[in-house]
Amino acid sequence: MRKLNIIEYPNIDKGRIRLKSFCTYNYSYVPSDDLLLKLKNKKYFIKTHGCQANIRDEETLSGLLNSLNMERVETKEEADIAIINTCAVRENAEDKVLGEIGEFKNLKAKKKDLILCICGCMVGQPHIVNKLTDTYEHVDIIFGTHNIQDFVRLLDIYIKNPGTRLVDVSSKSGDIYEDMPSLRVNKFKAFVNISYGCDKFCTYCIVPYTRGKERSRDIKDILKECSELVKQGYQEITLLGQNVDSYGKDLNSNVDFAYLLEEVAKLGIPRLRFLTSYPSDFKDNVIDVMAKYPNIMKYLHLPVQSGSDSILKKMGRRYTKEQYLDLVKKIKEKIPEIAISTDIIVGFPNETYEEFLETVDLVKQVGYASAFTFIYSPRKGTPAARLKDDVSYETKVKRFKELVEVLEVDVNKYANSLIDKVIPVLVEGPSKKDPNILTGVSEANKIIHFVGDKSLIGKIVNVKITKNHVYSLVGEMINE
Ligand code: SF4
């Protein structure tokens, strides 16, 4: 076995701690001359799994490595440093990542100097780090979501001690690092973090342990970042937080999410979105700001998770079915054209058929434009994972299919309502199936395909919708 240098091991109990004094704001980052020399012209590869927060972390890691004059490459075979940025939200995502890490074994055998690094939420869990250090000996550096700013220092330690594997996964709630270098994945759509971590502790969710205490960025730093994106010609900004609605609660000021949203909207970005909303923290003033600014997309992702009050309680979600439906009603009254999407978990431990039917009923009442449905996946270390579950997986799959059928009725209805309408579409690139077709997204995040020139990529164009394929639509570009 290769030697192992453990700087810090993840600790779920420590990750649970919430103290006010934890967060400090750090500005400016300078890489050392020594490392600049060692890594100059080397190549790196990054593969990211999971959510937008991980994509934003990837951009910071790319920025860090580019500041060392390294070059990003698209295949692992070309790389001197390979990073796998992992997701811990569901077990099948973890299995996929472990398979991918295993595939590196052959490459490492051929390319001895390749440095394989694993980061992201998965390594915030002690059992995963155990597994990696015990059975994936070809992994060189393991670092956590709170250690991204340390990555260059970790590389330095590793390069000075070749062959010694490194683990540095802090469970401290994390500080805020501003002015980190960043290389954005997309040249016209940008994610901007407004807060990190989560304090909600839904009983099934590992995020509060792996991403730590909820901490808001200073509004001046967010506005500075957004202004720069507007100046650079970006077409869309998505404000990111595990719970955007609680933005500012930890700051000693009157700033809340509605205020921040309005200030960003005023900067004039053509499209503004935000993710993710928490129903009982969603305030009326956010609805007012959404209604007031045409550049705030009339699209809202509002995770409900379940329509059963008893399951919501067991999940630790702090609202009832009725409160959720009241909120949806209020939003629809003020913004009639709103498209709402959601997340739903089917098969929470011991969910009865009657409880499941409450979810079906809620889905019918809301009429979602789109939805992300999942079968419950226990996450080690969370309270729900300790529950005994007497519902079989087959039953859960059956209910899952039943729910998807119900959801599709409204998803289809929403898509049909767009037929013959002319809608603005942000062109993202050529379609994966046919390079002669362009793919873009509507205000409500619907995928739209149409024939057009590649010079339109990154622009917002008007498209008349002609066909509905339920999860995507086909249209014709309208020249004005
Ligand atoms: S709000 Fe709940 S589901 Fe969302 S990140 Fe926080 S704990 Fe997880």
Image (cartoon, helix red, strand yellow):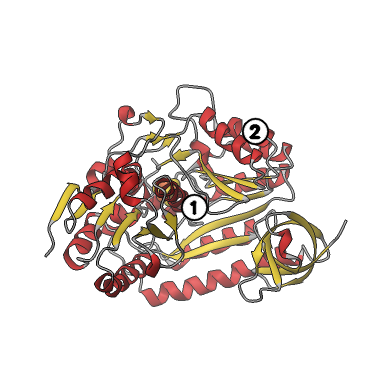
Marked residue nearer the N-terminal end (1 or 2) = 1
Q: Residue 436: horizontal and vertical position, in percent? A: 71, 73
Residue depicted at x 56% and y 50% = 302
Residue depicted at x 50% and y 35% = 247
Would residue 465 appear left or right of 384 to someone viewing this image? Answer: right
| CA distance for labels 1 and 2 | 22 Å
Q: Amino acid at mark 2?
A: Glu
Q: Secondary structure at mark 2?
A: helix
Q: Secondary structure at mark 1?
A: helix
Q: Quadrant of residue 396?
A: bottom left
Q: Residue 366: horizontal and vertical position, in percent? A: 63, 56
Question: Which residue was labeled with disc 1?
Answer: 52
| Disc assigned to residue 140 | none
Task: Classify 300 as above or below 87.
Answer: above
Where does the C terminus fall, quadrant-wise? bottom right
Would residue 41 appear left or right of 321 to someone viewing this image? Answer: left
Task: Classify 326 as above or below 125.
Answer: above
The extreme right residue here reads: 480
- Depth check, front residue: 78 or 326: 78
Task: Classify 427 as above or below 157.
Answer: below
Question: Which residue was labeled with disc 2?
Answer: 262
Q: Are marks 1 and 2 in contact (CB under 8 Å)?
A: no
Residue depicted at x 44% and y 34% = 178
Q: Residue 437: horizontal and vertical position, in percent? A: 71, 71
- Depth check, front residue: 57 or 219: 57
Q: Residue 250: horizontal and vertical position, in percent? A: 43, 29
Residue depicted at x 23% and y 45% = 13
Report crowding for label 1: few under 14, some 14 to 19, many 20 or more residues within 10 A (C-alpha): some
- Depth check, front residue: 181 or 356: 181
- Residue 283: tell me if it is visible: yes
Q: Quadrant of residue 364?
A: bottom right
